[in-house]
Amino acid sequence: MPLDLVGVGIGPANLSLAALAAGVDGLRARFLERRPGFHWHPGLLIEGTTLQVPFLADLVSLVDPTNPLSFLNYLRDRDRLYPFYLAENFHIPRAEYDDYCRWAAERLPSCVFGQEVTQVRWSAEESAFEVVTSGNTLLAHNVVLGVGTEPILPEPLVGIAHHSADYLTVRDSLLALDSVTVVGSGQSGAEVFLDLLRHRGGGLRWLTRTPAFAPMEYSKLGLEQFTPDYTRFFHALPEPARDELVPAQWQLYKAISADTLADIHAELYRRTIGGGWPDVQLAPGVEVTGAEKVDGRIRLRLRHRQQGTEDTAHTDAVVCATGYAERDLDPLVGSLLGPRDAAGRVTVAADYRIGLRPGITGSVFAQNAERHTHGVGAPDLGLVAWRAATILDAVCGRAVHPLPARTAFTTFGLVQGNGRAM
């Protein structure tokens, strides 16, 4: 008998869905992950780093705060509620979030690790999806893809640089070198640079293509672009408008927290006590146009984007904090997909269903693969529980968890026909 739901991948997105689904009577669900256990960005669990969202952006609380897998219940189970209360930390350590998710995964029998899904195909005979794994084949009426993203390196640095996703695995070797260059000025790049700055004597360079080391947009009304209200507005926009809007919103998700920038400046200032300047170079507006290994070192070809000038620099290692890309879904579900959008991407409906070819009566849902249709909030932890609840409602055909009708003070868009605000 087919399962009602199979989740492919167990990151925070599908783990949230598993937690919310666990309370639905009669729902038969299973979630599969190729890794042997839960790990959340292990290479970036740098000491002192915190989530950029409040602790309420856990797996369940913004949908079901009484759920036994809430962060507060995790603290209670760990006998840490009073220390947390007295710490007054709204933004928890990143390592603590990783531990919390692992705690939740261990309490969900539906989560199975060490099972890699290699293909999902449609069986007309069974009227169900065949989910092919490294061990067997499962049947399911619905499939949710939560396969996450993968690190990307600029073409000139492929095979030469480390990605920040692997930073902690190479950190000790980087600290022993004479010169290290960090490329990329998002939050990860800033955190890697700050950690190296605190633990090295000098020989440190930080390059970014952006014209400045810019702070994250973190105003209260600005953050309303990470609400369900804005997600619905964005999804309803024409495709060209969405494609124009996402890159213009880079300071919402690609910039640096003001606290991290302040910590970097404080460390640099500390180095000037007694006179002199630290042996550190911070260079915005600079892109790497080429790289090669020469006599055991790396020679970088650089271009300043505003000046139009070019130069070279030598370094012993490069760490790229150059982001992540949504994984290509074709290897898993390519045979199921229907028409693409104008840019060749999968179509994703408001309830996160992927557009499939005719004749398939089941549904495939996307998690964190829909920035082009749902906006920059797609990977944001604050929307994880709401998205999971939306998918769960679609799978069950009813409102399993009450979802708020309004989530922002801001009105996004106008009512058609009369020009009045919605």
Image (cartoon, rainbow, N blue to C red):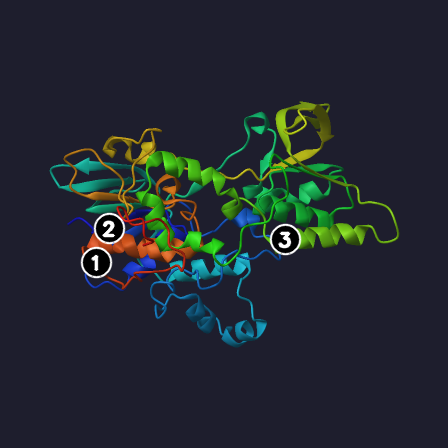
Q: SS of the residue at dot 3?
A: helix
| Contact? badges 2 and 3 (CB < 8 Å) | no
Q: Residues within 10 Å of mark 2 (few under 14, many from 20)?
A: many
In terms of sequence position, does the residue under pointer 2 or pointer 3 come before the other?
Answer: 2
The local secondary structure at tag 2 comes to: strand
Say what amino acid the circle numbered 3 marks.
Thr
Q: Residues within 10 Å of mark 3 (few under 14, many from 20)?
A: some
Q: Nearer the viewer, mark 2 or mark 3?
A: 3
Residue 227 position, x and y percent, is 39, 55
Residue 326 on image: x %, y %: 41, 38
Q: Which residue is mark 3?
A: 260
Whether the residues at callouts 1 and 3 have beta carbons within 8 Å, the answer is no
| CA gap, disc 2 and disc 1 | 8 Å
Task: Name the amino acid type tagged 2.
Answer: Leu
Of pointers 1 and 3, the one earlier in the residue sequence = 1
From what the image shows, is residue 372 above or below residue 20?
above
157 sits to left or right of 382: right
Residue assigned mark 2: 5
Observer-nearest of 99 and 346: 346
Q: Is residue 240 visible?
A: yes
Residue sitting nearer the eye, 5 or 263: 263
Residue 27, disc? 1
Q: Farthest residue in the left direction?
A: 125
Q: For residue 296, say whether it is visible.
A: no
Q: Are marks 2 and 1 in contact (CB under 8 Å)?
A: yes
Q: Identify the image quadrant of the C terminus.
A: bottom left
Q: Secondary structure at mark 1?
A: loop
Amino acid type, label 1 = Leu
Q: Mark 1 or mark 3: which is in front?
A: 3
